[in-house]
Image: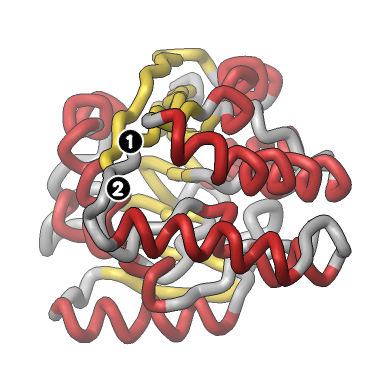
Amino acid sequence: MNDYMLTLSETEVARYRFMAQAAAERERDRWTAAGVVPGAQVADIGCGPGAMSCVLAAAVGPTGTVSAVDRDPQALELARSSAREAGVSNVSFREGSAAATGLPAQSVDVAMLRHVLAHNGGQEQHIVDHLATLVRPGGAVYLVDVDATAIRLHPSASTAVLAGLGERYHQFHTRLGNDLSVGLRLADLLMLAGLEQVDHRGDYQIVRSQAGMRPPSWAAREQMQATGIIDSDDIARWESEFQRLDSGQTSLTMFVPVFVAVGRKPA
């Protein structure tokens, strides 16, 4: 596994929560079809600060359970704290990697993995193979990832300033061996894991920036600077543009291609 990890600042945690709520609304029918229903047992792999875990806990209700796994102790501590604050009691958290969760085989109805494969270059099939072992016969593996190489920004004034941030972010991931367009391959990964493809769809998520909102590339700026891909002048230039956006002088709209794929284990 790569040691890449987004810095879990307050802003980044807020972004996770925003994404989790948006996903619950946008994917509700797909969740139901996959088996995320009241009483289900669901695994949230790569749970990060637990935003999605809490949303899934509400979806499965008090008779269901969510087993949340992440390899980062800081993220898990934030996740536990978030669950306590929200009064969520049907989620358990444990340390483990996406390819070695430590969860028992055939112990869940749905194993969900969101925006993790793009950060684990070379391990994608190994991870999906492991997820396939976790679900019971008839259960589903639910994958979500992006084609970050096709993200578009509007208006052009902000695009000109922030394009360099996205380009350097892509360089950073390429050096790590990561595939930022892995969303295009989700169906292949599921079928190679022995699962029956149920669904593979993609659409553009249109996100209008709000004050304080930052893209994942910004959360990785310290790691990128440490590798020499960017320097302090780059950071200052992009921060100035973000502050201009925060002030309301203009707004930024992000068009992000996101893919969902579901594979079911033969009964």
Q: Which residue is mark 2?
A: 209
- Quadrant position of residue 88: bottom left
As rendered, which of 64 and 116 lies closer to the eye? 116
Q: Amino acid at mark 2?
A: Ser
Percent coordinates x, y for residue 227 in the rendering: 86, 64
Residue that appears at 32% across and 65% down: 212
As rendered, which of 242 and 109 lies closer to the eye? 242
**Residues marked 2 and 1 touching at CB (< 8 Å):** yes
As rendered, which of 233 and 29 lies closer to the eye? 233
- Mark 1, residues whose alpha carbon is within 10 Å: few (<14), some, or many (≥20)? some
**Residue 207 horizontal side relative to residue 10, left or right:** left
Residue that appears at 11% across and 63% down: 62
**Total labels drawn:** 2
Q: Which residue is mark 1?
A: 253
Image quadrant where one finds the N terminus: bottom right
**Residue 121 horizontal side relative to residue 108, left or right:** right
* In the image, residue 96 above or below residue 57: below
- Mark 2, residues whose alpha carbon is within 10 Å: few (<14), some, or many (≥20)? some
Percent coordinates x, y for residue 22 in the rendering: 23, 43
As rendered, which of 64 and 231 lies closer to the eye? 231
Task: Point out the tag, 2 or 1, that comes first from the N-terminus.
Answer: 2
Secondary structure at numbered mark 2: loop
Secondary structure at numbered mark 1: strand
- Quadrant position of residue 251: top left
**Residue 104 horizontal side relative to residue 107, left or right:** right
Numbered badge on residue 83: none
Percent coordinates x, y for residue 68 in the rendering: 43, 64
Residue that appears at 54% across and 83% down: 74
Residue that appears at 33% across and 36% down: 253
Can residue 215 be seen in this snapshot?
yes
